[in-house]
Amino acid sequence: MQTRPEKLSKEDLEQIAGLDSAKLDMLAAWANKKLTCSHCKRCTLRCEVLKEPALDMGLVEEGYRAVVALPFGDQPDAVLRVVQERPELYHALRRCCFCGYCTATCQHHLLAPERMRDWRVLFMRAGLMPPDDSKLVMVDNEWNIFSAYRAIYGVGYPEFTSLAQAAELGPDTVDTLFFPGCSLVSYAPELTRTVGRWLTDAGMAWALSDDCCGSPLMSAGLFDRAAALRQRILDQIRAAGITRVVTVCPGCGEEFAELMGDEVDIVPLPELLLKKSRALERAGKPAGFSPLPEARVTFFDSCHDRADGRHGAAIRALVARNLPDAERLELDHHRKGTLCCGAGGAVASYDDDVTQRRVWRVIDEARKTGAETLVTACPTCTYTVAQACLGAPPERGIGNRHYLELLFGQTIDWPQVFAQLGGMWEGEYGPWLTQTFFA
């Protein structure tokens, strides 16, 4: 997550006061004032989740601080009282996608995703997060929706060195981890293999992980389990002597940077593709891409890329370089002002209307640009847009490609993916799935 400037605590202020410096006292007071919400309602106006109950992030912050100031054991009961007295707060926090759009221009440096996730932890401890909402995406379990899908449909990568194998072999075997993320590695195996072969052809010694970064666990308020999952991955990275993690999804990169960014280089895949392909071309070799023919494209930036824009900048450069004849258009909301596809925060399991409104806002805005194809950075965004367009009339939907599809000329068959996701519950594996997840 993006680093959030923190107000000086009572203890910090006491230490500064002990220095007996009027200037430091004044600076401390000024800093705390700058980091205190003024209730300007800018965030309220930017987000329907806050606007409907007339909340702002300052009120959300104040409520959180009041609860966590209590003894740990008293906090669940306090949360239940807050929800009973202010049900609109609970409803808003459960509908938050953690996209950060509401506080993207906050003058007081409040960051909504961090605090909204903290509230989810309190809700989980108070028994307000129904466990059935998240059973399919308990990604630290042996069986979750992604591992079950791969097992049922024979999705595997025996031709590549896995992270577990690299950890067993120890250092000097590989130096790079390729982390496609749970959606791409499960639903787009051929595209994942193509990227893997490209990495090998580019001279890289790498291993593959089919793990999840743990984001679904955090959406469920299970921070400890998410941290344990990422720590397990980090332990394997250390054992393998890996110094670079290449991520497809900006969200994965953001989660890993928080834990291991000080000791492992977290590199967006589009940046690596751009750098290595340029080097190959300078050496008189082909870049290794087979771009799809596109006339007009527009770009949907990931909300996780909002802070530094590394994925978005590299994707645009790749498209400009490899599809020079394609007209490149921009959404009204892009870069730091990008919207959310609606999939974040597991909101669909609580209020699917919010997800539908958000994804269709993106699709409608993309169509207004005149583009034929929406290019996405995050595989989960690609999934969400594809699912929305699947049953829509052609005149309402839009062409939808992940940037890797566009570059490597391999499309993801989303109708087949969605058919298989539904069919696995009705076929011979249906009883086992039901027993595994809902018994």
Image: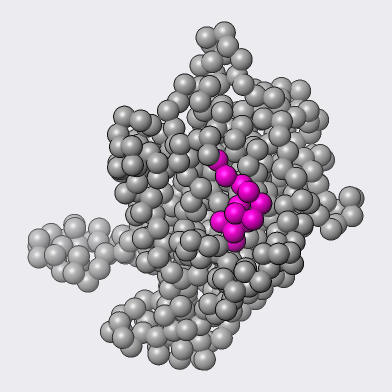
Is 14 on the left-hand or right-hand side of 282? left
Is 273 on the left-hand or right-hand side of 264? right
Q: Quadrant of residue 351?
A: bottom right
Q: State whether residue 118 is above or below residue 238.
A: below
Q: Residue at x 47, y 79 (%)?
A: 123
Is 169 on the left-hand or right-hand side of 438? left
Q: Quadrant of residue 175?
A: top left
Q: Would residue 410 be seen by someone viewing this image from the given angle? A: yes
Residue 232 in picture, x, y percent from top left = 36, 54
Question: Does the magenta stretch mainly form a helix, a strand or a loop?
Answer: helix
Camera-nearest residue between 239 and 324: 239
Q: Would residue 349 be seen by someone viewing this image from the given angle? A: no
Q: State whether residue 328 is above or below residue 233.
A: above
Residues shaded magenta? 145-157
Camera-nearest residue between 409 and 72: 409
Residue 388 in picture, x, y percent from top left = 77, 57
**412 part of magenta stretch:** no
For the image shown, how many numbered marks are present on the structure?
0
Q: Residue at x 48, y 61 (%)?
A: 142
**154 part of magenta stretch:** yes
